[in-house]
Structures are given as C-alpha cells and as structure tokens.
Image (cartoon, helix red, strand yellow):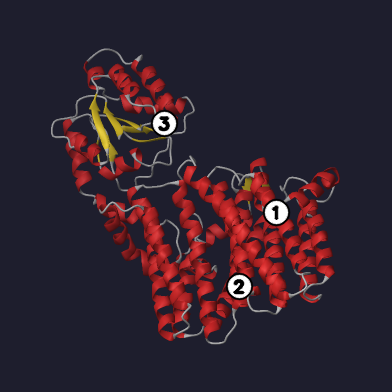
Amino acid sequence: MSTAILTGPPAPGSSLEGDLRSLGFDVRVANGPEHTAALISAVPAAERVAVVDPRFVGHVHALRLALTDPRFPAASVTGALTAQSAGRAALAGAVRAVSATVPAGAGAVAGDGVVDSVIAELEAQGVAVHHPELGSLIAAVPSEAEERHRVRAAVEAVDDEAVRLRSAVKARDGFFTTFCISPYSRYIARWCARRGLTPNQVTTASLLTALIAAGCAATGTRAGFVAAGLLLLFSFVLDCTDGQLARYSLQYSTMGAWLDATFDRAKEYAYYAGLALGAARDGDDVWALALGAMVLQTCRHVVDFSFNEANHDATANTSPTAALSSKLDSVGWTVWLRRMIVLPIGERWAMIAVLTAVTTPRVVFYALLVGCALAACYTTAGRVLRSLTRKAHRTDRAAQALADLADSGPAAEAVARVTARTARSLPGIAPLTAAVAGAAALVATASFDGFGSVWTVVAALVYATTSGIAVARPLKGALDWLVPPVFRAAEYGTILVLAAHAGVNGALPAAFGLIAAVAYHHYDTVYRIRGGTGAPPHWLVRTIGGHEGRVLAVTLLALLPGATDFTIALTVLAVAVALVVLVESIRFWVSSQAPAVHDEGEPA
C-alpha cells in the first residue's frame, strides 16, 4: 500500500484523510518537518510516498491525478506531492533541507507551507516534477477560515465525476470514435472501474471478441458476415473502453500500451484472414487482396512510426508546412475532415464492419485498398513536404531509433561496415536512394521474371548490398525516415508477389502467416522503443535474418522443384519466425520494468 503523510493535523471537519484512504493510501500524521522526514524514511523504499499539506482543499480527482499516476517519478499539485521509488531519495533530501530552514513555532508544528516548499526545493535541484493539468478542478491551500469556506464552495460547484469522465476520453481521436463510440463507452469504462476490472482485461476481451468475429466471417454465410460486422464493432467499443478505463482510473503501464497496440493489429489481421476463408467457401480466392491490405496497412504504420521517431527530439524543429497544418487545425470542420481522410482505426473498422454485413469480402478488400492507399499518399506526401521544408537537427537517439526500425540483419550489417567510410562522403539523399533502388529492382524482378527464377535471387543479393549502403551512416538526413518503410514494402511485397506467382493453393495463406509474424516483430520493435527500453536484442534480429536475410531466404525457397514444396517451406519459415519473436516478446514484456506509458498519439 502507498503511504500519505500529512505534515500536520488536518483542519477540523476536513475530509482529507478519508479522501486519501479512498485513493488507496495509508495515512500518517506528522507533527512537523523533522517528523515528516522521519516518517518518509520509515516507509519501505519500493513504496510510493505522498506528502500533503493538512490545509489542502480540493477535488478528490485532483489528488488522484497528482498522487496516483504511475507514469511519473514525482508529481504535484498545490499542497500535495508524491514520489515513487525512483524519486524517494530526492524527496527525503528536499524535506530535510526544508526542515532545516523552518523556524520553530506553531507553523512548524502544524507543517504549514512545508509541501510547497519541498516542491520548490525539488525543482531547484533539477528534479522533474510533473504538474497535471487540472482544468476546472481545484487544488488549494487556504490559510484563513473565510478563504477556506470560499474554496470549499468552489469545489462543490464543479462536478468532480463529470470532469473525470470527460478526461477519460482520448484527447485526439477520429470522427467516428469521438461522436459514435466515446459518448457511451466512457460509462462502460466507469462500470468496469467500479467492478475492479483492469484495462488489460478489457483489452483481452476486445481481442477475443474480434477473433470470434473473424470466425463468423470465415463461415462464408450472410448470417455469419452480419454477425462478424456486429462483433467487430463491439470489439472496437471495448478497444476504446480499455484506454478510457486506463485514463479514468490512472492504470497506466508499459505492458498495457503494448497489448493495446499489438492486439489492435492482431484483431484486424485475423479478421482479414477470416474474410479470406469465408470468401474461399464461396469459391472466391481473395487471399492476395487480404495480404495486400495487410501489407499496405503495416507500411502506413511504419511511415508514421519512422517519421515520429525521427522528429521526436529534433532541435530547431520548425516548418512552414507544420505551421499551416496547425493553422488548419484551428478551424473546426478541417480538423474532422483531415482526421477522416487518414482513415483511422474507428472509420476503418466501421467501414469494414458495414461492408462485411452488406457486401462480399472482395468488395471489403477493394474498399480497404483504395481507402488505405489514398490515406497513405496523403499522410506520406504531407510528411515529405514537412521534412523538406523543416530546419531540424536530428539527434543520435533518433538516428539509432531509425537504425533499429530498419531491422538490418548480418548481410546488410557486413556491407555497412565495409562501405561506412565511403558512405559519409555521399550526398544527403544517398541512403534513401540506395534503399529505393534496391527495393525497386527486387520487387520488379520478382514480379516480371517469374516464379523460381535465379534472377530473383540475384536481385535479393543486390538488395542486401543496397540495404547495407543505406544504413552505412547515421540516418539523420531530411528524408532518411523513409528508409525503414521502403525496407518493409520491399520485404512484404516480394513475399506477396512470389506467393501469388506460385500458383498453388496454400501459398498465399502461408505468405500471410509469414508477413503477420514479421509484422508482429516490427510492431514489437516500435513499442519497445516508445516504452524507453530500446530495440529487441541483437541476437533476435540476427536469428530471424533481418529484412534482407528473410528476403534472400524466400527467393531461395522459390527455387525448390515444386510450388507445393515452396508452400511447405514458407509455412515452416512462418512458424519458426513466429515462435522465436513471440517467445522473446512475451518474455520481455512480462518481465519488463520499463516506466509506465500511455500513448495519446495519432489514431492507428
């Protein structure tokens, strides 16, 4: 249990002790600064400690925001301060420093003003203290009785629970989610919170619902398609609810953010497979379309991830294009139009659900491919324009993140070491040019030279060489963030083309499984970086070959005597990659001690 220490006896009639206990704190009362320091030292080092001014008057949710959010080592509002284990030493030192300056007297015994003095001392020492935005919530330390009554009246005038429900909704969401889901899903989140359910449990329920939806779609019947569409929408409601529950109850965690993100992809891609199976029951083979939709959607996300990581901590990060975008966001209707154009998860899943219920899987995939292609062109063009007009100095951290997202294997790394000195003298556009040239040659050869051609293997070797040249120097150029998406498009596209050219049943489903396993690895890499834990271990990347190694392996498998042999080998490769990346990923996230995070970024 966490411990809250009042720096003096609470005021008569104060509900402060009860409020703190309702938030899960064991409350102790000190009789001055020195006693406060002693009580802090007595609390086990791994526990959270809060120090609260006994005169505090405010909303319970203001205390909750300041004292229970797991994402920050130290946080405060007026009159209340908390420190987790990472900030405990600094807190104890600040309390001792303040106690040495407090003169003897009634104020010292009551602990008046100690908390705000400790907050100031911590910040003077350079400790990062988070100050949550309270909005209409109140947190104050009135010193006189009249002022105390006035503050209490102001507290009663604001509905604490209404504010809490509003803040549970994501600050930036799509049109469909904002107007069709969130108005009622926030109440489902509150219902879950009051029954002790966790965000991870709701996330898991959303996954199971989507998998059942995929199973319904796989029946190939109209009733199955209608049920699949309804269940997919309900899965999305639960998907919104888990994040709202996390914000409502401040149950943030690194693992929760990872589960939410990876399960979204698992749900969507499993549903694609269900649609393809359902279509096959009616004699319509749409596996190539399903695979194309998955490739396009994953590459869209890699563009988002790479751009964001490249500019996450860039300095002098200004752009007239970004300024124009911000200006457009100040006009109400353009905000929603621009959010709908990118086809975020809410709009995308609503479209899939409705089309599944009333049309055929082929129509669903055509709509997905067209919609996602337009969205990809819009977002990528805008980001390229921003990059070309932006004056930014990218950091070593950003360059390392892009190198990790590149997912280079032993072959590309060997080429990079050999060409590193030469690469430094090449023009700034050289990394992207090398990546695009190798990728274009590879996909074109696989597309036009036929299945099982030795020239495709040669193209794969050329691709490994150009991939190494592309990462031979730090990726700090204006457009270097495009290198990882180019690699993803080349790898996924080559597997899709070779499986389509194999011309036998099972080749495309096997390719679907392989790309799904590799895509999981790439998403896992992103969320490890976002969680501040760095990329997956190097041995994992080397074991599964890196992107260029897997491409070479698949082109060699295409040389097997029969297309059936290729399908079997592709299936084995898919299972092997899936086992390795899943076991390592689950091991890491279960044991990870990364700080809690909650992603409020762009809708997926």
Find out whether the residues at labels 2 and 1 contact each other: C-beta distance under 8 Å. no
Q: Marks 3/2: CA distance?
A: 49 Å
Rendered image quadrant of residue 53:
top left
> Which comes before the other along the chain, label 3 or label 1?
3
Q: Marks 3/1: CA distance?
A: 38 Å
Q: Which residue position holds label 2?
A: 509
Q: Marks 2/1: CA distance?
A: 22 Å
The amino acid marked with disc number 2 is Pro
Is residue 313 something that shows in the picture?
A: yes
The amino acid marked with disc number 1 is Gly
Q: Which residue position holds label 1?
A: 546
Q: Nearer the viewer, residue 344 or 537?
A: 537
- Residue at 45%, 74% in the rendered image: 215
- Mark nearest the camera among 3 and 1 is 1
- 144 to 182, vertically: above or below: above
The amino acid marked with disc number 3 is Ser
> Which comes before the other along the chain, label 3 or label 2?
3
Is residue 337 found left or right of 492 in the rendered image? left
Q: Nearer the viewer, residue 70 or 539?
A: 539
Percent across and percent down for residue 245 are 35, 54
* Disc ID at residue 85: 3
Find out whether the residues at labels 3 and 2 contact each other: C-beta distance under 8 Å. no
